[in-house]
Image: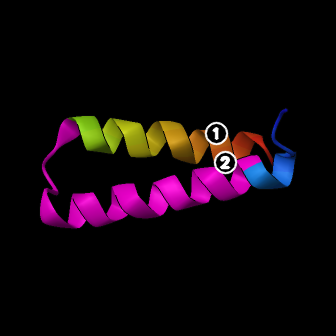
Amino acid sequence: MGMTNKQFQGFVRLTLAQIERALKESPDNMELQELRDIFQNMLEDGN
């Protein structure tokens, strides 16, 4: 059973929101910044 595009985008948005929350607590965390960039690109590529 796969995800629809809408479900996948919802998952990416939810994950991005959690990454942004983590970055507020640790703004210098390069791994989180890179992860945010990857997920942001995934969201942009899906549009």
Q: Which disc number belongs to residue 42?
A: 1
Residue found at x 59% / y 59%: 13
Residue found at x 50% / y 36%: 38
Considering the numbered disc 2 on the image, is that residue within a helix, a strand or a loop?
A: helix
Q: Which disc number belongs to residue 11?
A: none
Q: Whole-percent x and y of residue 46?
A: 78, 43
* Dots 1, 2 in contact, CB < 8 A: yes
- Quadrant holding the N terminus: top right
Tell how many labels.
2
Residue found at x 31% / y 44%: 33
Q: Residue furthest front?
A: 1
Q: How is the image coloured?
A: rainbow
Considering the numbered disc 1 on the image, is that residue within a helix, a strand or a loop?
A: helix
Between the C-alphas of marks 1 and 2, the distance is: 4 Å
Residue 21 vertical position relative to residue 44 in the rendered view, above or below: below
Label 1 is placed on what type of residue? Met
Q: Main secondary structure of the magenta part?
A: helix
Label 2 is placed on what type of residue? Leu
Give, as a single range, the part of the protein colored magenta. Answer: 8-30
Q: Residues within 10 Å of mark 1 (few under 14, many from 20)?
A: some
Q: Is residue 12 magenta?
A: yes
Disc 2 designates what residue? 43
Residue 41 vertical position relative to residue 18 in the rendered view, above or below: above
Q: Whole-percent x and y of residue 35?
A: 39, 38
Q: Nearer the viewer, residue 18 or 28?
A: 18
Q: Is residue 39 left or right of residue 8?
A: left
Q: Whole-percent x and y of residue 11?
A: 63, 52
Q: Residues within 10 Å of mark 2 (few under 14, many from 20)?
A: some
Residue found at x 77% / y 53%: 7
